[in-house]
Amino acid sequence: MSENETPLQIGKQLKDARVANGYTLDDLQQATKIQKRYLIAIEDEKFDELPGDFYVRAFVKQYADTVGLDGNDLLKEYDDYLPKTKTPEYSEHLTQAVETRTGNHHVAADGFDRARKYIPTVIVGALVVIILGAIWLTAIVKNHSDSATKIDSSSVSVSGESSKASSKSSSSSQKLNFTTSSRSSSAVTYTTSQTLSKATPLTIKAGSSSLKTTVTVDSTSRLNKALAAKKTGSVTLAKSAKTIVITLGSASGVTVKIGNQTLDITNNNKYPSTKTVTIKLGSSSTSSSSTSSSSSSSSSSSSSSSSSSSTSSSSTSTASSSSSSASSTATSTSTTSSSSSN
């Protein structure tokens, strides 16, 4: 086999294997990521068109492996005819790489030496920061201790003020003395001589089932809705509220409160069918006032009558006395006349 025939055989061998596997140059380019013009150069044995001698063997091996040939065997077979990998160009690149790495090492060493010069400064700066931090922390602890002392010294007065505020708060929670003025199987009426001292919430909480409820305050509708089970509806009663009428679908399990005061609308569940609850505020006081006024009028009338009777009696007595005196005088005159005649 001549020197000119052998190189051509490697390109032909690779091309035949490619064709046998059904690869086009475009397919091979996509599979190997080697540019198409380099693949053509390999098949035509134009190795000088490749990027460098180093790539010749690499591209040939990759081409062979892709088309089903043993790349290593092919390189050994044509070793004498392929460019050597360690060409002067490769050696020059290798030398430059070594020099670059050495230069980088020197640069790194110089950088480390410069950094070492600043280490004492950094240490001193860190110590200063630590000392300042300790001083700052001590000041904070001292201020906190002083504040705690002040709080302890004023705790007595604050406690006293809290007690006063608590007693004032408890006294401000108004308790109304309700009386059940009437009750039937479906309705109940509560009355009290008291009125609200401030705006007070009226709350209605449904039992285990939904509840249709309406609330009317002094003939004005304030609530009309269906409450889901265990849900609460509320109305704020003004100080001037007098008559509240609550209509319920069913009173079973329902809780009605004025402020924090609960109304037993079913009387311990004796009247579970209660549907109308009427609350009258200040009603007993008004009745009492009317009764008192009536009694005063009657008393006045009686006094007048008594006075009139007394006056009449006195007049009658005076008249009678006058009449008696006149009669006596007449009798005396008559007697005197009679004596003179004799």
Image (cartoon, rainbow, N blue to C red):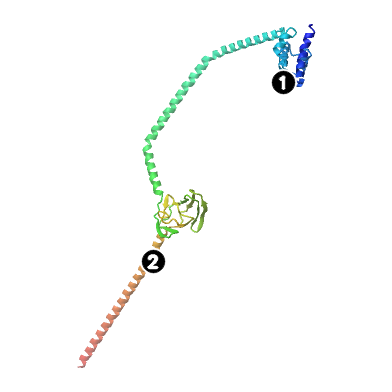
Question: How far, Cα to Cα, is label 1 from label 2?
Answer: 119 Å
283 and 269: which is toward the camera: 269
Look at the picture and state if 161 lies above or below 41: below
Q: Amino acid at mark 2?
A: Ser
- In this rendered view, identify the residue nearer to me: 312 or 78: 78
Image location of residue 234, percent across then percent down: 49, 50
Find numbered disc 1 in the image and state the secondary structure of the residue it sits on: helix
Q: Is residue 54 visible?
A: no
Task: Assess disc 1: are there few (<14), some (14-19) or many (≥20) residues with their C-alpha within 10 Å of its C-alpha.
Answer: few
For residue 294, the mark is: 2
Residue at 44% x, 26% y is 139
The quadrant the C terminus occupies is bottom left
Which residue is at a point 51% across and 57% down the rendered structure image? 220
Q: Secondary structure at mark 2?
A: helix
Compared across the picture, whether 132 is left or right of 49 comes to left
* Residue located farthest toward the bottom when viewing the structure as drawn: 342
Front residue (pair 158, 5): 5
Q: Is residue 235 left or right of residue 313?
A: right
The location of residue 256, given as percent across then percent down, is 45, 52
